């Protein structure tokens, strides 16, 4: 039994089954709070806790799922290409919006970390929380951050964005699909983009563009992280 739990097969199978079940519950319930990704995470945590399975044993297979994260993000380029004419028409607003979004994210996190007296390592871990995991992890590691905390912050940001997108769009009366897509991608990266694709092809394409542009801008801003952390 222990050999099975420590094999890659266990982690992959548990993750896939939890995700499939979570998505089915989301589809049947139709409730925003019943988000498939959140439910899948909770089910995995429950299984590991109830059967006293260590995270290290699970991650032997679970880490294989992470290998698909970067290719899945790149696949968003398909929807971007389909809306290339929309991008050309709104190029300047897209560039300005993503730049402002990335700068606002970094400065707001930095301000809150200072206000709550967090140390340098935690601050470096949280500063890139609004960009996709591979970029955020590299930035945090390069500035003395704790990568595991960065990953958790990125995932939490994405989940919150995924859950709150419908409410935020109604609350702020966002009618333009370009505006909606850019806002989603700039704030909640890949998980938000999954919700944007549900809203429409234009929203999904613009959210995908925002992931890339905000990642580039945040990488450039990382050159000034040492100043912010001093």
Image: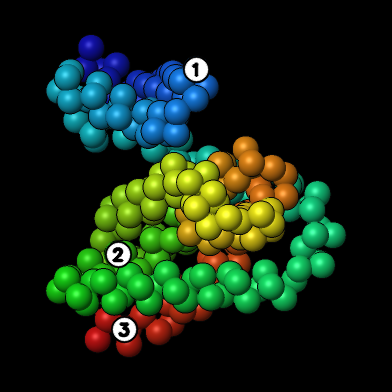
Judged left or right of residue 188, residue 80 is: right
Tell me the tag on residue 121: none
Q: Residues within 10 Å of mark 3 (few under 14, many from 20)?
A: some
Q: Which residue is mark 1?
A: 28
| Above-or-below relation of 161 to 225 | above
Q: Residue placed at 72% from the left, 76% from the top?
A: 92
Picture residue at 30% right of the left edge, 29% below the top: 42
Answer whether residue 118 is visible to the viewer in this image: yes
Crowding around mark 1 (Cα neighbors within 10 Å: few <14, some 14 to 19, many 20+) is few
Please state which of the two labelled residues, at mark 1 or mark 3, is closer to the viewer.
1
Label for residue 228? 3
Disc 1 and disc 3: Cα gap in Å? 46 Å
Residue 70 position, x and y percent, is: 54, 48
19 vs 172, left or right, is: left
User: Which circle's residue, 1 or 2, is located before the other in the chain?
Assistant: 1
Q: Residue 49 appears in which quarter of the rendering? A: top left
């Amino acid at each position: 039994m222990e050999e099975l739990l420590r094999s890659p097969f266990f982690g992959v199978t548990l993750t896939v089954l939890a995700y499939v079940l979570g998505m089915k519950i989301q589809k049947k319930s139709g409730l925003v709070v019943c988000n498939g990704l959140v439910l899948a995470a909770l089910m995995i945590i429950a299984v590991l806790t109830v059967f006293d399975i260590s995270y290290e044993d699970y991650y032997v297979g679970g880490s294989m799922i992470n290998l698909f994260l970067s290719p899945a993000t790149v696949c968003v380029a398909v929807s971007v290409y389909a809306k290339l004419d929309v991008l050309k028409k709104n190029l300047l607003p897209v560039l300005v919006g993503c730049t402002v979004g990335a700068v606002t994210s970094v400065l707001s996190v930095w301000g809150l970390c200072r206000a709550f007296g967090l140390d340098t390592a935690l601050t470096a871990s949280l500063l890139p929380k609004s960009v996709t995991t591979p970029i955020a992890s590299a930035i945090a590691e390069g500035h003395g951050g704790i990568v595991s905390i960065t990953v958790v912050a990125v995932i939490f940001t994405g989940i919150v964005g995924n859950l709150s997108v419908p409410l935020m769009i109604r609350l702020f009366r966002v009618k333009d699909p370009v505006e909606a897509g850019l806002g989603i991608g700039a704030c909640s990266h890949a998980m938000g983009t999954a919700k944007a694709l549900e809203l429409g092809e234009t929203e999904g394409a613009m959210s995908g563009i925002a992931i890339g542009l905000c990642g580039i801008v945040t990488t450039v801003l990382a050159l000034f992280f040492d100043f912010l952390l001093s």
